[in-house]
Amino acid sequence: MKKGTFAYRFFILLIVFIFLGAAVLLPLAAAKDVEPFVFWIIGGALLVAFIVTVVVNEIVIRKRKK
């Protein structure tokens, strides 16, 4: 994968958000008194944050290249 391409940036951000999600969700999974609905809310928030990060990152890069 060539450095500087969309796919490269996408996979780097994906790896970062996977580690972030694991750091947040794994301790919650170990707790016994957490509602399952909390996992859906946090997972959804992480997904939205990932999508926004990718879109904003691409917008900034496109504007910088002009």
Image (cartoon, rainbow, N blue to C red):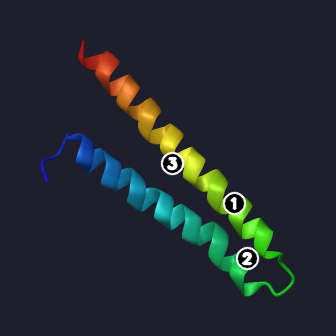
| Mark earlier in primary sequence (1, 3) | 1
Position above or below: 65 against 14: above
Q: Residues within 10 Å of mark 2 (few under 14, many from 20)?
A: some
Q: Which mark is residue 50?
A: 3
User: What number of labels is visible?
Assistant: 3
Decide which of 65, 42 is in the foreground and name it: 42
Q: Amino acid at mark 1?
A: Ile
Q: Residues within 10 Å of mark 1 (few under 14, many from 20)?
A: some
Extreme-left residue of the structure: 2
Residue at image coords 44%, 58%: 16
Whole-Å distance between the Cαs marked 3 and 2? 20 Å
Q: Position of residue 15 (x, y in %)?
A: 40, 61
| Mark earlier in primary sequence (2, 1) | 2
Residue on which disc 2 sits:
28
Quick check: marks 2 and 1 in contact, CB under 8 Å?
yes
Q: Position of residue 56 (x, y in %)?
A: 46, 31
Position above or below: 23 against 59: below
Residue at image coords 57%, 46%: 49
